[in-house]
Amino acid sequence: MIVTVTPNPSLDRALDLDRLVVGEVNRAHATHVDPGGKGLNVARALGRQGVDALAVLPVGGADGAQLVALLAEHGVPAVPVPVAGSTRSNITLSEADGATTKVNAPGHTLSGAELDALLAAVEMQLGAAPRAVVGAGSLPAGAGDSFYVRLSGMAGRYGVPVVLDTSGAPFARAVRSGGLALVKPNEDELSELVGRALGTVGEVVTAAREVIALGTRAVLVSLGAHGALLVHADRTWWAGGPPLVPLSTVGAGDATLAGFVATPGTAAAKLRTAVAWGRAAVLLPGTAVPVPEQIDLDAVRVVEDPDPDLALKEL
Ligand SMILES: Nc1ncnc2c1ncn2[C@@H]1O[C@H](COP(=O)(O)OP(=O)(O)O)[C@@H](O)[C@H]1O
Ligand SMILES: O=P(O)(O)OC[C@H]1O[C@](O)(COP(=O)(O)O)[C@@H](O)[C@@H]1O
């Protein structure tokens, strides 16, 4: 069993357009409503691939009720923690050439008591010794930056590995506090964390090793169309595949993380699966998650210790 925690879930609303013209009236030819939020998507992707997963999330208001109904409809085991504020809606605009424009709402803040209730709901699951707990996504505005530090401390007391995918101040706080099994920043999130641009494989590896030096075991850096790098203290792997024209890139990072945690075996096998799940996700509309028949492991090439001088754009 893998437990995911999403402190700021959303109802993802997507509109498919031929081309987005900013400042004009645009007409969509299709719309999608999906459960959203990083931990939820990880649980959805795991479930679709037959891996036991449970999502813990706060829910409130009409959109929260719709989110719970959608999770039930999608067969995602979930522990909804009722909160006073309304669950947010995030908007995606997907263009025919694969360009994705996303607007994420800040999310209604959670009170101290609600944050405690969310952690208590996770703690109930930790007693059953899950394989990992995945904390993922932003924290709602005003909730403070320390939620993932508390989550990691709590999971540590139960001996459960913690995997984290977040950004900004909550990411920096959690990395500084250490004790994480894996983090999954994308290139921008890692660059923001270390405060400099990352243009080459070597620059990404150096940045990832700064994270590792603070007490994280492994860093999985997703690079959009250029695949992903997995960095350990002493070794590095890159994986990627031939170019694709995405339908919607929303949820690709979450599918990537799900593929990684789902896979037993070697680092290379985990990375290959992660990239294959991410690639499958971009070929689906809205925030859809792939089924096993949509995963193409053979299309993904894994390279051990890639050349540090290679530009990310050349991967
Ligand atoms: N344009 C794309 N073409 C091919 N694969 C992609 C594309 N965008 C994303 N992916 C796949 O999805 C993974 C995650 O995407 P990325 O954009 O890095 O994550 P995030 O959604 O967290 O920002 C990538 O590692 C890659 O395998
Ligand atoms: O919590 P954040 O950072 O605002 O992100 C939430 C959004 O990210 C998603 O989880 C998708 O994430 P990825 O594209 O990184 O996989 C959406 O479902 C959701 O709308």
Image: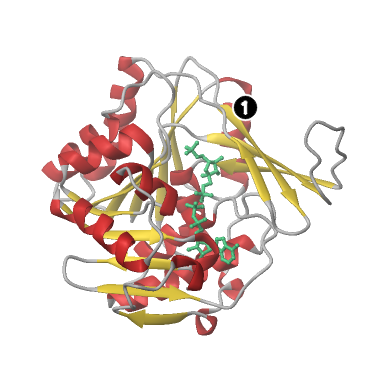
Q: Position of residue 48 (x, y in %)?
A: 53, 61
- Check the picture and name the quadrant holding the N terminus: bottom left
Q: Position of residue 13 (x, y in %)?
A: 68, 38
Q: Position of residue 275 (x, y in %)?
A: 47, 69
Q: Nearer the viewer, residue 298 or 232?
A: 232
In the rendered image, the vertical position of residue 109 relative to residue 234, given as above or below:
above
Q: How is the image coloured?
A: secondary structure
What residue is drawn where x is 51% and y is 25%? Answer: 106
Q: Residues within 10 Å of mark 1 (few under 14, many from 20)?
A: some
Q: Which residue type carries mark 1? A: Asp
Residue that sits furthest to the bottom in the current view: 298
Q: Nearer the viewer, residue 206 or 100?
A: 206
Residue 190 in sight in this render: yes
In the rendered image, the vertical position of residue 96 relative to residue 264, given as above or below:
above
Quarter location, residue 262? bottom left
Element type where label 1 sits in the image? helix
Q: Nearer the viewer, residue 206 or 260?
A: 206
What residue is drawn where x is 33% and y is 23%? Answer: 115
Residue occupied by mark 1 = 63
What residue is drawn where x is 28% and y is 36%? Answer: 148
Side of 218 relative to 40 (left or right): left
Q: Nearer the viewer, residue 63 or 300?
A: 300
